[in-house]
Amino acid sequence: MSQRTVEDEALLDAARECVLEVGVRRTTVTDVARRAGVSRMTLYRRFPDVTTMIQALMTREFSAIVTQVDREAERLPTGRERLVAGAIDGADRLARNPLFLRIVDVDPELLLPYVTTRLGQFQLAVLASLELQLLEGVRDGSIEATDPAIVARSIELSLRGFVLQTLAEGAEAAREPELAELRRMLDRYLTP
């Protein structure tokens, strides 16, 4: 993935504002350029189309969650504790993220490929983080995982299901008990 510039970040900030206001499908290059205070051609030089720009926005926004929860979990003593805490906190934060919620509310069909047929950059970042933490837990003896790549994929699928389920009507009331159960499930799954 290429390194983003300050200008890219400003364009993605403008795209985020547009998506939060009108949704993905109604966000246009013209609207983003106007909001960012640049010409359409400037935007096209950085992102060839709206789809690419929105993908970059989602990757930036959602990958920041992974980075933040990993950083916060660093203080925990074992790989298993760090992985479980980060996974639970990350799933909860994603399910509450304003951009994610807006996409689900206005353009939910855009998420279908990421649920059924392909992994996006965010999901790949989650898998990489999980696999690294699994290896750390195996090294410190707090995790049993004969194949960390398969275990990482299994955990990501569980987290994905949790995030999508929490979007159902009335799911907010069950969030805390379900997070506790998900935490217990992951901890027991990984315990040697």
Image (cartoon, rainbow, N blue to C red):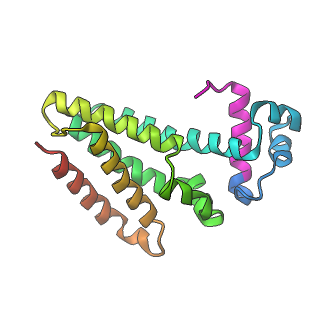
Percent from the top left, x then y, of residue 148?
26, 37
What residue range appears in magenta? 1-18
* Residue at figure coordinates x 46%, y 44% from the top left: 123
Percent from the top left, x then y, of residue 111?
56, 58
Q: Say whether residue 16 is magenta.
A: yes
**How many numbered marks appear?**
0
Is 9 situated left or right of 48 in this image? Answer: left
Residue 35 falls in image quadrant: top right
Is residue 96 visible in this depiction of the protein?
A: no
Percent from the top left, x then y, of residue 19?
70, 53
Q: Nearer the viewer, residue 36 or 79?
A: 79
Q: Can you say which quadrant of the picture contains the N terminus? A: top right
Q: Can you say which quadrant of the picture contains the C terminus? A: top left
Is residue 111 visible in this depiction of the protein?
A: yes
Q: Above or below — where is 9 with respect to 164? A: above
Q: Above or below — where is 177 with respect to 51? A: below
Is 133 situated left or right of 21 in this image? Answer: left
* Residue at figure coordinates x 74%, y 28% from the top left: 7
Extreme-front residue of the structure: 117
Is 87 situated left or right of 189 in this image? Answer: right
Residue 5 falls in image quadrant: top right
* Residue at figure coordinates x 41%, y 54% from the top left: 92
Q: Above or below — where is 121 with respect to 114? A: above
Q: Say whether residue 79 is magenta.
A: no
Examine the residues drawn in magenta and state their main secondary structure: helix
